[in-house]
Image (cartoon, rainbow, N blue to C red):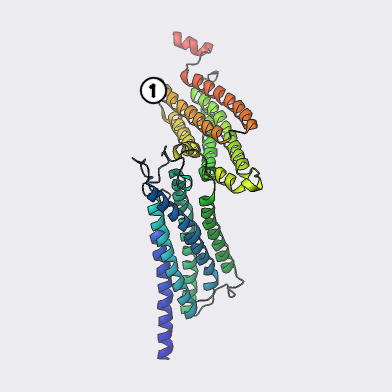
Amino acid sequence: MADSESNSQRHQQKGDLVIEVFKNLIEEYETDDELSSPTGIRSKPMSTKTIKSKKALLRKLETRLLPSLDQQIKSLPELSQSISDLHLDLILKSQSEFKNTLQEIGETKYWLCCRSCSPFESNDSGLEEIKSYRIYVLSCKIELDLMPTICQTFERYKELLEQRMIANSTGKSLPDQSYQKGSNRMEVVNLTSITSQEINATIELIQGSDFDNLQYRWPSRLSAIDSGLEEFLILIHEVENEPMDCPNSTQIDPSVKVAKSILVLIKLSRIFFQRISSVTSQINKEPHQQQQQQQQQQQQCFSNLSSAQLSTLGELPKDFTKILQDVLQLLQNSPMTEEESLIEELSTLIEEIKTSFTSGLDVVHQLAINMDYFRVWSETWKSSFDISIHNLTQISESYQYLDCQCSRCSSVGQS
């Protein structure tokens, strides 16, 4: 009886240790939604030795560390079928491997990013896979996507082990008697699959073209632009439905005029980003002659653009979203008595929109240099964009709250 209690106690301690190790892994690698600050621009070019070293680090991440992490993740569902002593020992061993691999990934990323993670580097067009903007994007991918997904997986495995250890210690059966066929197993298998896909997406980003990299965060950022559109629609609805001082007034609130002009630019921006995505996709898939395939693939993967140029286009959705938020806050919060100041601030923001998209389009022209049909499209789009900017500028410059001019209000004013 004493031996049985002793064995049960040791088993419980081992299970607690497994749970504790998962907790520690989560605490160590859990990140918030903020990316570590990018490095500054290099004061001098990298040496040949440093270039070779960083390329070797990237290959190590691509060919050894990330594939090893993938295999370790895939082993978890099988190891977690049971909470027997044997399986707990195997999980502890797997956790040790996780710790070593994740630590090595972190160290590799640190040295890879060291003095090489600036989106604004202008002298690295020939550095191919270790351009600063590519390293910056990879760092984003690891910190904002990969690590949170891994931690979510660890968290769910920890919760399931806690449930099963409690059930085992109290002698109560879990609702899911057959772990092999139950919903819990399906959940962890699916979660493991998602994590594996995230690991492979990170590898594909390393192997991808410059234009795969610059578009990596576009989906979430385009979603933010859509949210901005909704906010402007809400502003228009709220202002237009405010009670008027005079029921006969036909004056349109100037904030509504600006907001409606902004909506046109938002829609044009979506057309722009969708078209750019299709262009870069076609560039990456353009057919090759068999004897030149390897060379052409290399040329397509690494453009002759610098990190600063890639960043101009890659960060455009984020920059545009920030400008939209600034315009929205101006329209929502500026007092009616400060029209002059508002006009000045609007003028600055409109110029930022114009400059951002013009610069982004210039970068795409360098990418699509032999694509005549794209040039025709871009000229049409740019014409629409310029007209919209011109209209917005005129509306902003005439931003003014006017008194009602109906006969009733005019007579009151004269008296």
Percent position (x, y) of residue 288? 64, 44
Can you see residue 406? yes
Q: Classify mark 1: residues with Cα within 10 Å, few (<14), some (14-19) or many (20+).
A: few
The one nearer the camera, 47 or 131, is: 47
Q: Residue at x 38, y 53 (%)?
A: 111
Percent position (x, y) of residue 250? 55, 18
Can you see residue 399? no
Percent position (x, y) of residue 150? 48, 60
Image vertical order of residue 143 relative to residue 370, above or below: below
Image vertical order of residue 393 relative to residue 233, above or below: above
Q: Residue at x 52, y 62 (%)?
A: 70
Q: Which residue, given by chain and number where applicable, does mark 1 sit on?
A: 341
- In this view, which residue lies farthest toward the front? 291
The one nearer the camera, 145 or 301, is: 301
Q: Three-letter amino acid code at disc 1?
A: Ser
Image vertical order of residue 285 relative to residue 80, above or below: above
Q: Report which quarter residue 326 is drawn in.
A: top left
The one nearer the camera, 40 or 14, is: 40
- In this view, which residue lies farthest toward the bottom? 1
Q: Quadrant of the C terminus?
A: top left
Q: Is residue 10 left or right of residue 265?
A: left
Q: Report which quarter residue 108 is drawn in.
A: bottom left
Q: Is residue 23 left or right of residue 206?
A: left
The one nearer the camera, 318 or 357, is: 357
Q: Residue at x 40, y 43 (%)?
A: 118
- In this view, which residue lies farthest toward the top? 414
Q: Secondary structure at mark 1?
A: helix
Q: Residue at x 52, y 65 (%)?
A: 71
